[in-house]
Image: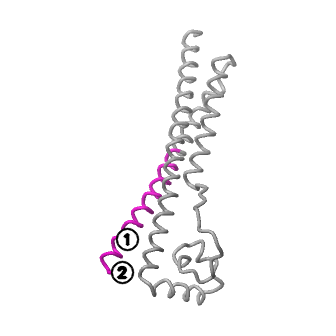
Amino acid sequence: MSLDKRLVVQKILDDQNALGVRADAKALGFLTTLGIFTAFFIAFVKDINPDYFSIAFLVIYFVSAILGVWNVISAINPRIRVKTEEGEVCKLDPHKAAFFAEICKFNNVQDYKECLQGMLKDEETVVDVYARQIYEVSIITSEKYRSAQRAVYFIIAALFSEFTLIVYLFVLKVVAG
């Protein structure tokens, strides 16, 4: 593989990895936002007089917050099952030379070195390894963004119910006072 082609392939892989990192950062930002508003909300929860309206919005808040946190966790650590080809793969399969989970399975550095050298012998194998890695990273990134998007909806629902309940409590105090 020429240096130009290798740089293009490496750039694509780096871009895909950067998108995954961005999805993680967004998810952590959502979690932080929910945490800050939850701490703020706790100050108001103690003043709630149980009635149907406040209980309904408390339930909406807690369900939305829990589902939001669940989706944030799913965005940070997605459960992905990449489809693999059937059949037994030998220990020196060149495709194992580029994936950290597979690299960790080698018994020692020498075994890994032999596998890496096997991969580098054939340009087509190197292209296959990079293509597979880019594809799998893209699948993971796609799932991260899907979970982050769901988290946004649940966190917005939690914050909406929180603010609605706070306004409701404020109005009750104004009317009673």
Occupied quadrant, residue 122: bottom left
Q: Residues within 10 Å of mark 1 (few under 14, many from 20)?
A: some
Q: Nearer the viewer, mark 2 or mark 1?
A: 2
Task: Assess whether residue 91 is covered by the magenta stretch.
Answer: no
Question: Magenta: predominant secondary structure element?
Answer: helix
Number of numbered discs: 2
Amino acid type indicated by mark 1: Val
Q: CA distance from mark 2 to mark 1?
A: 10 Å
Q: Residue at x 45, y 87 (%)?
A: 121
Q: Residue at x 68, y 18 (%)?
A: 49
For mark 1, give the secondary structure.
Answer: helix
Horizontally, is 123 left or right of 168 in the view?
Answer: left
Q: Which residues are magenta?
A: 1-30
Amino acid type indicated by mark 2: Met
The residue singled out by tag 2 in the image is 1
- Label drawn at residue 9: 1
Task: Assess whether residue 28 is covered by the magenta stretch.
Answer: yes
Q: Quadrant of the N terminus?
A: bottom left
Residue nearer the viewer, 89 or 176: 89
Q: Of marks 2 and 1, which one's residue comes earlier in the chain?
A: 2
Q: Residue at x 58, y 19 (%)?
A: 169
Q: Residue at x 50, y 88 (%)?
A: 117
Q: Position of residue 153 (x, y in %)?
A: 52, 36
Q: Position of residue 80 (x, y in %)?
A: 59, 57
